[in-house]
Image (cartoon, helix red, strand yellow):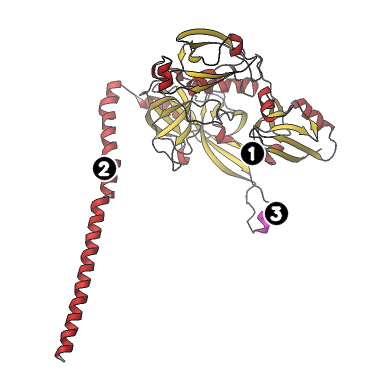
């Protein structure tokens, strides 16, 4: 019996020892992990201590020293920024019925929000193209909660600018500033409706000018970069200086989450001003072309060419029969200035040229073999001519159309066609046509102008229209559209 008891005691001691060792090991592992990772300490040190130190510097040193009054700018701008609601018509297909999806209770539903800026007392409002694209109608709500249905005057996807109009008078509005005069470090306010929180004002400084984001779908890839907090819903809102002047339209955020992560980007108001003026007068943007292709210079190339701080863009191609070639500018030249404004990269060059129309004269400064020379050049349209491009609106299709350029014809291998530049509520959009689509043929008849399309529509007494065309990326598409008589 004694031997059995001794064995039991030995076994018990063995198990107790194992349990103690296991507990000690577990505690050691936890303590070691906490010691190595310390996630709470690092997070607190980064997200709390640093910003408090930074904000104290701004509040106690910079603002009083610069005599910055942000309250005045906020008061001026908050009533001139509107809340935009975008509606679409609800659809119910056979597939929805088969899979048991419920039929929408409302014919139209809100499917997008954003901001806009009143720029005249009689109701012109500027916003982003992406805020209002693909809508059945647009509602504008003022800061005093008055609501209006807006008319789309025109839109330009290449700059992401759209112009609306509401029927109202004596509205508060923002005056245009001059985005060429802004400096890095200037204080700014971003005003908009983030997350549907209306009339929200945030403050920051200009972090960079002429920021190039490598956006190939934009004709002007040059933005004002700020650290003012901008979130979804701010798009189309105002970026104002301390005087309350409009210096940009908030457009993009740099984020991996979809929300503000430190930097936001606005379209310079000098670009917006010109786009708005064109949309008012012509219904489309009149772009001035030099007829050349350029590349940014790296530090080594700039040093070899005797250029300071990578200033200038290199010309790699000159197009025949366009203004640059006619003036005598050559491939290999370096563009350093436009109208006396320094050109640092392609973005700043695009920003300068975007302020002019075909027929406008600009002075281009180029460097060739170490020497600078000025060239006075008359800008051309996309066809190499100095006349304005005319657009035609066909209301029954809900489309604004313009002729395509020689370059587009050559690139896509087509003999003619008409481009869809703006889509409002109508038959084309209902069938899924997107802006940029080039109509090549209607009912198997080739078209070269909007008048050709109108003529075919008038001659179609029964049935509908078969529209054939191509998108800028080369994708061909066909759309069948019913015609009501």
Q: How crowded is mark 2: few (under 14 residues within 10 Å), some or many (20 or more)?
A: few
Residue depicted at x 55% and y 41%: 112
Tell me which label, 3 or 1, sits earlier in the chain: 3
Indicate yes or no whether the magenta region holds residue 102.
yes
Q: Seen in the image, is 38 located left or right of residue 467?
A: left
- 343 vs 69, nearest the viewer: 343
Q: Seen in the image, is 417 located left or right of residue 100?
A: right
- 244 vs 141, nearest the viewer: 244
**Residue hosting label 3:** 94
Q: Is residue 175 visible?
A: no
Which quarter of the image is occupied by the N terminus? Answer: bottom left
**Residue hosting label 2:** 45
Badge 3 marks a residue whose secondary structure is helix
Give the magenta-colored segment's residue range: 89-107
Q: Seen in the image, is 121 located left or right of residue 93?
A: left
Indicate yes or no whether the magenta region holds residue 221.
no
Which quarter of the image is occupied by the C terminus? Answer: top right
In space, the residues marked 1 and 2 are separated at their CA atoms by: 49 Å
**Residue hosting label 1:** 136
Query: Taking 126 as reference, is 198 above or below it?
Result: below
């Amino acid at each position: 019996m004694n031997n059995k008891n001794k064995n039991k005691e030995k076994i018990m001691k063995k198990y107790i020892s194992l349990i103690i060792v296991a507990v000690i090991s577990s505690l050691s592992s936890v303590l070691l992990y906490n010691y190595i990772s310390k996630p709470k300490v690092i997070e607190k040190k980064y997200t709390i201590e640093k910003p408090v130190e930074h904000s104290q510097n701004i509040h106690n040193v910079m603002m009083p020293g610069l005599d910055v009054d942000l309250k005045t700018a906020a008061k001026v701008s908050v009533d001139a920024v509107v809340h935009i609601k975008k509606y679409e018509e609800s659809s119910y297909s056979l597939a929805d019925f088969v899979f048991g999806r419920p039929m929408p209770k409302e014919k139209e539903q809100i499917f997008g929000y954003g901001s806009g800026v009143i720029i005249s007392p009689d109701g012109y409002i500027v916003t982003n193209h992406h805020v209002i694209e693909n809508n059945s109608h647009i509602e504008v709500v003022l800061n005093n909660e008055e609501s209006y249905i807006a008319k789309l005057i025109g839109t330009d996807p290449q700059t992401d600018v759209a112009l609306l109009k509401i029927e109202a008078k004596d509205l508060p509005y923002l005056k245009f500033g001059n985005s060429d005069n802004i400096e890095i470090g200037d204080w700014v306010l971003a005003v908009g409706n983030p997350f549907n929180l209306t009339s929200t004002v945030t403050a920051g400084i200009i972090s960079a000018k002429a920021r190039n984001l490598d956006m190939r779908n934009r004709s002007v890839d040059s933005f004002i970069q700020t650290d003012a907090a901008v979130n979804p819903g701010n798009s189309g809102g105002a970026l104002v200086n301390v005087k309350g002047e409009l210096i940009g339209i908030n457009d993009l955020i740099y984020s991996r989450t979809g929300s503000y992560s430190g930097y936001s980007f606005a379209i310079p108001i000098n670009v917006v001003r010109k786009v708005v003026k064109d949309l008012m007068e012509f219904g489309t943007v009149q772009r001035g072309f030099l007829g050349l292709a350029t590349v940014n210079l790296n530090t080594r190339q700039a040093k070899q060419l005797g250029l300071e701080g990578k200033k200038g863009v290199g010309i790699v191609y000159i197009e025949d029969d366009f203004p640059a070639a006619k003036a005598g500018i050559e491939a290999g030249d370096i563009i350093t200035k436009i109208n006396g404004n320094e050109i640092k990269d392609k973005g700043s060059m695009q920003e300068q040229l975007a302020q002019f129309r075909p027929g406008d004269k600009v002075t281009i400064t180029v460097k060739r073999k170490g020497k600078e020379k000025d060239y006075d050049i008359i800008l051309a349209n996309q066809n190499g001519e100095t006349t304005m491009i005319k657009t035609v609106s066909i209301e029954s299709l809900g489309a604004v159309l313009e002729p395509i350029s020689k370059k587009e014809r050559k690139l896509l291998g087509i003999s003619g066609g008409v481009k869809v530049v703006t889509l409002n509520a109508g038959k084309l959009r209902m069938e899924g046509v997107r802006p940029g689509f080039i109509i090549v043929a209607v009912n198997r008849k080739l078209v070269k102008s909007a008048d050709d399309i109108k003529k075919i529509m008038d001659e179609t007494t029964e049935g509908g229209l078969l529209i054939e065309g191509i998108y800028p990326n080369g994708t061909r598409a066909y759309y069948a559209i019913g015609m009501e008589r």
